[in-house]
Amino acid sequence: MGSPPQMTGSAPPRCAWSTSAPELLAYHDAEWGFPVGDDRTLFEKLCLEGFQAGLSWRTILGKRENFRAAFQGFDISAVARFTERDVERLLQDSGIVRHRGKIEAAVNNARRAEELLHREGSLAAFVWRYEPAPADLPPPQTASVCPASVALSKDLKRKGWRFVGPTTMFAFMQAMGLINDHAEDCVIRPEAERRRAAFVRPAGPRRANAH
């Protein structure tokens, strides 16, 4: 994300990437690394991480509200019903990233998400199954991939998802709190850890009616 400016005075230390722009700092302090169990939010982040490929998160963050408007709040069932006409409409929307492959991937992934919801009960239950043990992770801020992100990527690709490579999935896991990758001295790291400790991991579907 480029070289952040040097922090001055007695400002508490934070992850270096967050200090390069005010919007990144706000996102870092209020969202990044806090656990999420809401399917819509998880799907939104999966889509936005795909759109980020080759770009900076600052670019995507600046367009996030435009993306939400364009993709009907990332409602999974609504996006799954998008047609070729919707793809063409989105390609004319200057408020988002106008990349046909990424737009088509978001629509495809909504359809794959509906299939997953039918099998698993929730996207959250599926995603949190890949939460790695802290002991299996590299030191914070030192890696862009981990075994769990590789496994999640492979599973999603087997299920027909697109733009879900292991590096993209690692960034997703960082952001959605499946791991606490705040720097060791980051002032937000303890709060992220508290929230992870209090977070109730989503369970899979009940099988009582299975036969």
Image (cartoon, helix red, strand yellow):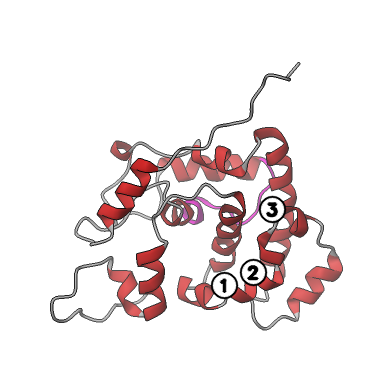
CA gap between label 3 and label 1 equals 18 Å
Label 2 close to label 1 by CB (< 8 Å): yes
Q: Nearer the viewer, residue 105 or 61?
A: 61
User: Which of pointers 2 and 3 indicates the residue nearer the eye?
Assistant: 2
User: Which of pointers 3 and 1 indicates the residue nearer the eye?
Assistant: 1
Q: Which mark is residue 176?
A: none
Circle 1: residue type: Arg
Left or right, residue 116 beside residue 58: right
Residue 107 horizontal/vertical position (percent): 74, 59
Residue 142 visible somewhere in the drawing:
no
Majority secondary structure of magenta residues = loop
> Where on the picture, by quarter, is residue 116?
top right
Residue carrying label 3: 109
For the point 56% across and 50% down, which residue is it? 38
Quadrant showing the C terminus: top right
Q: Nearer the viewer, residue 63 or 138?
A: 63
For the point 81% across and 74% down, which residue is it? 88
For the point 50% across and 35% down, which residue is it? 129
* Position of 81 relative to 197 (above/below): below
Left or right, residue 120 beside residue 24: right
- The kind of secondary structure element at disc 1 is helix
Left or right, residue 165 beside residue 83: left
Residue 86 horizontal/vertical position (percent): 81, 69
Residue carrying label 1: 64
Residue carrying label 2: 68
Circle 3: residue type: Asn
- The kind of secondary structure element at disc 2 is helix
Left or right, residue 129 beside residue 103: left
Label 2 close to label 3 by CB (< 8 Å): no
